[in-house]
Image (cartoon, rainbow, N blue to C red):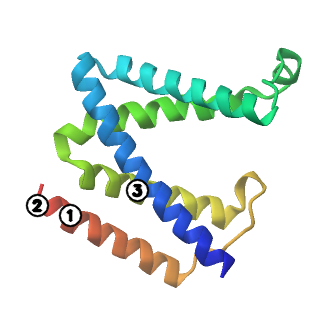
Amino acid sequence: MLNALFIIIAIAVGGFLTVQGMINARLSQALHHPLQASLVSFSVAMIALLAVMLARGISVPSLSQLKPLPPYLFAGGILGVIYVTTVLVLMPRIGATNVVFAIFVGQTLVSLAVDHFGLAGLPQHQLDLPRLAGVSLLFAGLYLVQMKA
């Protein structure tokens, strides 16, 4: 039962990503540059995070906490910028469904590799025939969605 709740939450958050992309695409059009829209989006996100942290009594990490961390741990922010900027540029060009579906296929392919090899300490789940069949169906779905584009 708890797993079903987590799946429902994940589906809802997936919907939020589409709404975020739509809003950021409109922001980019209003500001006339995708990087400006990404900067505004991330600035609002940072303010929101700081407010939540302050409300919950969570401190901002100090430089002494950050300094010993390996540089690759900061790549999430760069990947976030790439994701947000790509979505807000592509949605007005190819539509929300095409962008989100293609991103979902990419996420699934990378997730299969992460699961198969148990990367980043995650549990290992072997790549098997049912998973390969599922990915094949995703590619078929992507093809069908693109036919209307």
The label nearer to you, 3 versus 1, is 3
With 123 as the anchor, is 27 left or right in this view?
left
Q: Is 28 left or right of 111, judged from the image as shown?
A: left
Counting from the top left corner in percent of width and height, residue 57 is at: 82, 32
Q: Amino acid at mark 2?
A: Lys
Question: Crowdedness of circle 1 by 10 Å Cα count: few (<14), some, many (20+)?
Answer: some
Tag 1–tag 2 contact (CB < 8 Å): yes
- Give the residue at mark 1: 145
Residue drawn at x 58%, y 30% as measured from the top left: 48
Q: Splitting the image into 4 quarters, where does residue 50 fall? A: top right
* Amino acid identity at mark 1: Val
Q: Residue at x 43, y 80 (%)?
A: 133
Circle 1 SS class: helix
Q: Secondary structure at mark 3?
A: helix
At label 2, counting other C-alpha atoms closer than 10 Å, the crowd grade (few under 14, some 14-19, many 20 or more) is: few
Q: Nearer the viewer, residue 24 or 74?
A: 24
Q: Quadrant of residue 41?
A: top left
Return the residue at label 3: 15
Q: Which residue is mark 2?
A: 148
What amino acid type should be assigned to the residue bearing mark 3? Gly
| Quarter of the rendering occupied by the N terminus | bottom right
Gap between marks 3 and 2 measured at Cα: 21 Å
Q: Which marked residue is nearer to the observer: mark 3 or mark 2?
A: 3
Mark 3 crowd level (few <14, some 14–19, many ≥20, 10 Å Cα): few
Q: Secondary structure at mark 2?
A: loop
